[in-house]
Image (spheres, rainbow, N blue to C red):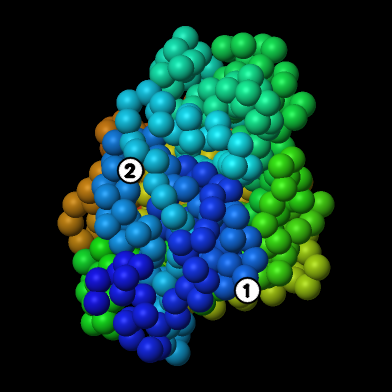
Amino acid sequence: MKLNDANLADLPEDVLRPSYDRSALTPGIVHIGVGNFHRAHQSWYLHRLMQQGEALDWAIVGAGVRSYDSDMRSRLAAQNYMTTLIELSPEGQSMEVVGSMIDYVAIEDGNSALIDRMAQPDIRIVALTVTESGYYIDPVSQAFDTAHPDIVHDAENSDTSRTAFGAMISALKKRRETGAGPFTAQSCDNLQGNGDVLRQTIVGLARLQDPDLAEWINENCSFPNSMVDSIVPSTGPALIEKARAAGIDDTAPVSHENFRQWVIEDDFCAGRPAWEKVGVTFTDDVHAFETMKIRILNAGHQVIANVAEVLSVETISDCMEHPLIRALFEKVALDEVVPHVDAVPGMTPELYVALIKLRFSNPKIGDTTRRVAYDGSARHPGFVLPLVRKAIEKGTPLNGFALVEAAWARMCQGTREDGSIIEANDPMWDALQTTAESARMRPQVWLDQPSIYGDLAQNPAFSAAFDHWLRMIWNDGMDAALSAYCEMSEDEGSDCLRA
C-alpha cells in the first residue's frame, strides 16, 4: 500500500498511524535538514503530541539548502510528507507512520523561497539538523570561522545566501521590517552547547552583514541549548524492503532503536509545543545531560568505530560481540571518560556506561561502523579531543584516548588488515589519507595537523602514547594493541607514557 493520506486507513492493522486530521494542521516550525534523525526524533515527539489532540498549529515545514535535499523533498512530497518509523528492539519491531510534517520548501539557489517561508509570522521556531561540522566553527579555537568561503559569500550577498544561517538572517531582517517579530532558532545537532554555538554562528554572520540587525537578533531571538539522543541508522534498500514486507510502500522509511531522549532549555521567545507531555525533559542544566551523552555515547562510538573498520567488523552490535573491542570500550569509558562526567538526576556515569553497552549491543539496529566513523575530522575534535584536554588538565589516564586516535590514523590510511580498501569516508579524506601514510613511519606527522589537534601535538604525554600505539598497530597489528591496552594496569600506563 503506497504511503499517502488517501491510503492511511487501509494500512496494515498493526501499524500505528495519525489519529488527528492532517488536513487541519497549520505550520509553526521550519526544520532545515530533514534527514533520518529529524524524522525519527524531533518530528516523532511532535507527532505524539498531535496524537493527544495538541500542537495542531505547530506542524513542520521541511527545508534544505543543498542540492541533495531535493531528492528527499521529492520522495516525501510523493507520500504527503509522511514517514514510516520502524522501531527495532532486541525482541522485535513495530511500525508507526508519523504525520507531523505537512510541507517542504522548494530547494533553489539563493534560498529565496526558504527566506520567504521563514519570514511569515506563523513560523515561530526554525530548527536545524545540519551535522556537527555544519556550523562553521574553527575546530581548535571553537570560534566562528569568518574565513570560510560560504561565510564570505553570505557576508557579501545577504539576499542570496548559500548557508542556512544566511537564510535565517535574511528572514529575520524581513520579520523585523514587517513586525512579525523574532523566532526561536533551535539546534538539534550533537554539539555541546548547541544553542550557544548556533547563536555564535548566526550573530557572527549577521555582524558581518549588518551590525544593527545582529544586535536585534542577539537581544530578541532565543537559542535554547538541547541534547538529542537516539541511534538512527542509515536507510538503505533493505529497510525499504522491510517496510514493503510489512505492507507499506515508503521510499523514505527510518529505523531507530527502542530509546529516545530529548533534553531542552526552556527558552522559546515565540512559544513552543508542550513537549513535556510526551517525555521531553526541560531543564536549566542541559549541559550535564549533554556532557554525559556526548562523552560516553558519542565519544564511545569513536572509540570503537575506527578499530572496527580496520578489523573488518561491520556493525556496532558486532563490535560489542568482539571481545577485544568490547573490552576497549569498557576500559576507556570507565577508566578515562567517567572521571570527567557528573551524575544527572536518576543516572550515574557508571550506570550510563552500562546503558550504552546495552544500546550498542542491540543486534536489530544494524548500525554500521562506516556510518559511525564518518566525518572523523569533525567528530574526533568534537567528542574525543576535549576529553584528552580534560585528562591533561586533571592528570587522569589518557592512554586509551591516544590508542583511539592512533586507530583513527590507521583507519585513514585506507586499508583494512585483511587487505580490503576503506572507501573515502570524510570530507578531508584525501589529505587525511596522505598524512596517515606518512605517519606510518613518523607518527608525530598525524598529530601535526593544527586544524585537528592544535597544541595537543606538543603535549609530551599524549604524543608519546600516540607514538607508542600507532607503531604497535602497524608493527604487531590492531589485536595486539588492543590486548596490550586492555591488560594494562594504571601503573603500566604511566610507564608507557614515560617511555
Q: Amino acid at mark 1?
A: Gln
Other residues around mark 2 within 10 Å, as few (<14) / some (14–19) / many (≥20): some
The residue most toward the left is 420
Can residue 308 be seen from the camera position used here?
Answer: no
- 335 displayed left or right of 96: right
User: In the rendered image, which quarter is residue 175 located in?
Assistant: top right
**Between disc 2 and disc 1, whose residue precedes?**
1
User: In the rendered image, which quarter is residue 208 located in?
Assistant: top right
- 332 displayed left or right of 255: right
* Up-down relation of residue 252 to residue 354 (above or below): above
Q: In percent of the image, x 53 and y 17: which residue is there?
A: 146
Q: In percent of the image, x 25 and y 71: which residue is there?
A: 2
Residue 69 circle label: 2
**Measured from the top left, where is residue 350 in percent x and y?**
70, 71
Identify the residue position indicated by label 1 in the image.
52
- The residue closer to the viewer here, 491 or 17, is 17
**Measured from the top left, where is residue 428 in percent x and y?**
34, 34
- 487 displayed left or right of 340: left
* Up-down relation of residue 376 to residue 219 (above or below): below
Report the quarter where the C terminus lies: top right
- 436 displayed left or right of 287: left
Q: Amino acid at mark 2?
A: Asp
**Measured from the top left, where is residue 271 in percent x and y?**
72, 48
Q: In percent of the image, x 69 and y 46: which residue is there?
A: 225
Label 2, secondary structure: give it: helix
Q: In percent of the image, x 43 and y 22: which residue is there?
A: 161
